[in-house]
Image (cartoon, helix red, strand yellow):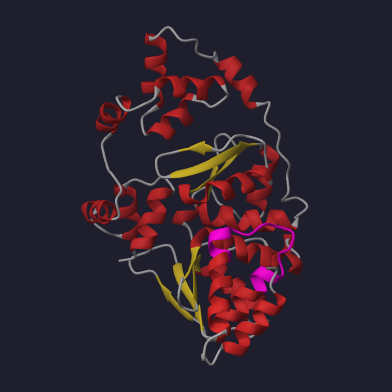
Amino acid sequence: MDEMLIEKLFNEGHSARAIGRQLNMNHHKVAQVLKIKGYTLLSNRQKSAKFASEIDWNAAYSDYKSGLSLTNIGKKYGVKYDVIREHFLKQGLEIRTIREAKKLNRIYEHKNIFDPMTNQGAYLLGWILADGTLGSKLKSVRLRITKEDREHTEYLRSLLTNAPVGDEKFSVGFSVTAVEIYESLIALGVKPRKSFTDYDISWDLLQEQHYPYLLLGLFEGDGSISKDKSVISFLLPSKLMAAIHERIFIPLQVTDYWCKPITGNRYGLMQIRFQDSDYYTIGTWMYSKTHAITPLPRKYSRFINNLNRVSSSRSPFKLLAKQSLGVMKV
């Protein structure tokens, strides 16, 4: 059982039942794992009753007047949007008409950094493949990230749009509704229900200079790095992993890494782990080749701290750590 995957899917918005179906697990077992990790699982009625009494309604209405939608305010406070709407109406507060709401949504600007592909676009593509979702009905793209990384979420949002970052109970995120961006991502191979699909991307739309940006986005969105060990790991669908192996790992002479399928996953999800010399090769390549973006500070600082620790130790990788520090953008 992969607890990290359960937590990831839950933060993407999947229910315990949906996660159970995907991982071939009883949903009660999924709920137990989430509760142990500190998540609260309530029915919609329980959520409304519990959280409505805890909402700062003045702040909620200020959010609404500043442009946040009823849906996003509901997500911020953990209730359905109609709970917010009914309270506003009961208090005699003004609610936007559908036409006004649509007009407000159109004031947000966006830029298509995926066609033609840019370095920033490849980086954000990696994040979208890891933590994003496409909405086929509205032709939208949405990215949700843990609240711990809110500042970096603001940075990722700035690469694509000036729409606000919205708060939810366990995550923050933003969305863009734009046909041209949606179609560009579809052309790149991103799928609306990618968590339930084994997929690859359209590599012919990327150049080699984009590869480290793509891999860094994938790592920051769906990977981990140990605080005190030389270990980097990824979660990747098997088809995408095979393509990355051919285009990135083999040229870097990184071929002896640990790799195995996630137990119970029916959609080809693989866990990949790099350690020893491969750790330094992959980490240094990702960070030293991506000067056009700002990396996620939390993971970047762990890598730098580990390089400093190993370079002053008696580790057999002391020289590799020193060499990595020499080419890093510190």
Q: Which residues are magenta?
A: 285-300
Q: Identify which residue is drawn at 69% across, 67% down.
A: 211
Q: Is residue 178 left or right of residue 143?
A: right
Q: Identify which residue is drawn at 54% across, 27% down.
A: 68
What is the total number of numbered labels drawn onto the structure image? 0
288 drawn magenta: yes
Q: Is residue 115 left or right of residue 38?
A: right
Q: Nearer the viewer, residue 211 or 323?
A: 323
Q: Residue furthest right?
A: 116
Evaluate whether residue 255 shows in this view: no
Query: In what quadrant of the picture does the C terminus appear?
Result: bottom right
Q: Where does the image place residue 259, in percent across and percent down from the top left?
A: 46, 78
Evaluate whether residue 188 shows in this view: yes
Say if 299 sits above or below 111 in the image: below
Q: Nearer the viewer, residue 212 or 288?
A: 288
Q: Residue furthest front?
A: 312
Say if 124 sits above or below 141 in the image: below
Q: Where does the image place residue 96, in percent across and percent down from the top left?
A: 54, 14
Query: In what quadrant of the picture does the N terminus appear?
Result: bottom left
38 drawn magenta: no
Say if 78 sits above or below 97 in the image: below
Q: Nearer the viewer, residue 59 or 69?
A: 59
Q: Nearer the viewer, residue 8 or 114?
A: 8
Q: Where does the image place residue 75, in percent across and percent down from the top left?
A: 42, 34
Q: Where does the image place residue 168, in percent across and percent down from the top left?
A: 44, 38
Figure quadrant of residue 246? bottom right
